[in-house]
Image (tube, grey):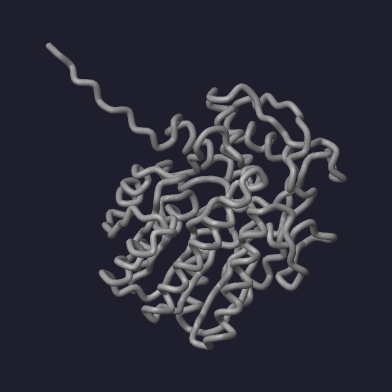
Amino acid sequence: MRVLVTGGAGYIGTHTCVELLNAGYEIVIVDNFSNSKPEALKRIKEITGKDFKFYSIDLLNREELEKVFLENEIESVIHFAGLKAVGESVQLPLVYYQNNITGTLILCELMQKYGVKKLVFSSSATVYGDVKSTPILENFPLSATNPYGRSKLIIEEIIRDIGVSDSEWSVAQLRYFNPIGAHPSGLIGEDPNGIPNNLMPYISQVAAGKLKELKIFGNDYPTSDGTGVRDYIHVVDLAKGHIKALEKVMLETGVDAYNLGTGRGYTVLEMVKAFEKASGKEIPYSFVERRQGDISTCFADPTKAKMKLDWAAVMGIREMCVDAWRWQSNNRDGYEVLAKVPVHT
């Protein structure tokens, strides 16, 4: 089966492509490298020993994206492509709405045109907004505290409307909690542009000496140590969840949402201590003001994914930290490959 993977060169995309290829799927990757590197695609091939088609395309370019459907017999889509930084979305809401929502609309219109009605959508736990209780269930009220989360929520609603209008559509909306870690090979991992927005690459870069100290946003939350609580999930566990979701949508119709998390929350300071233990490196940190749009506590009830997708996270916080450090220590500058300087004799 040929699967179109949008944003397949990104952090979660690369790990999912590895799992897809290892499971015997054919894949076609589309990515514009806005927050990813071409080197990541080479690493996917190195890990799996398998090749695939790739198109350097922005989803906003309808004509170019249509060529992908014309040139390939696409049977299903896993849609990762999108801007994803909470803080940046508060500063650039129009950019986030235009990119995330319009890009998805164009993709879905082409899927409809070419009769491709099997979709796994990369959503987010941010669609739950500032929750009143935890763990979070899929039937909790939906809202959003920032434009990034709101773009995901709007897309979820659009997809549900598509499903109502055409009963042939089958969609799994996967609400991620906090993916961290890296492939155990150390060949692929999270490589953000500039100063990281997410906790684990920030900690890793401090440990590697690239950044001086970790800035922790807020120490006055109503938690055990004042820092925010999140449900951290190993990116390989998350990637395997996509395979299970794809299997589900290929067999059934309808639109449904699933939490992909571990069901356990850790504070930022607990994560710092766990990483120090796994890496043997001290992580200096300081506290700064809360980040606009952030919430206090967020962790999943993953029971539905276990029952309906036969999926559960199996790796713990130690594996997450060990694999993240292996990736960072083996790739201090991420996917940046130094050009070989010719030696003159």
The C terminus is located in which quarter?
Answer: top left
Residue furthest to the top in view is: 345
Residue 146 position (above or below residue 275):
below
Q: Tell me what residue is drawn at x 57 percent, y 27 percent.
A: 207
Question: Which image quadrant for residue 22?
Answer: bottom left
Residue 248 position (above or below residue 188):
below
Residue furthest to the left in view is: 345
Q: Tell me what residue is drawn at x 54 percent, y 45 percent.
A: 181
* Residue 10 left/right relative to 278: left
| Residue 311 placement (x, y as % from top left) | 57, 68
| Residue 344 placement (x, y as % from top left) | 14, 14
Residue 224 position (above or below residue 102):
above
Q: Tell me what residue is drawn at x 63 percent, y 72 percent.
A: 157
Q: Tell me what residue is drawn at x 47 percent, y 44 percent.
A: 35
Residue placed most toward the observer, 97 or 262: 97
The N terminus is located in which quarter?
Answer: bottom left
| Residue 226 placement (x, y as % from top left) | 83, 39
Residue 208 position (above or below residue 184):
above
Residue placed most toward the observer, 262 or 253: 253
Question: Which image quadrant for residue 330?
Answer: top left
Question: Which image quadrant for residue 223?
Answer: top right
Number of numbered tags placed on the structure image: 0
Residue placed most toward the observer, 81 or 297: 81
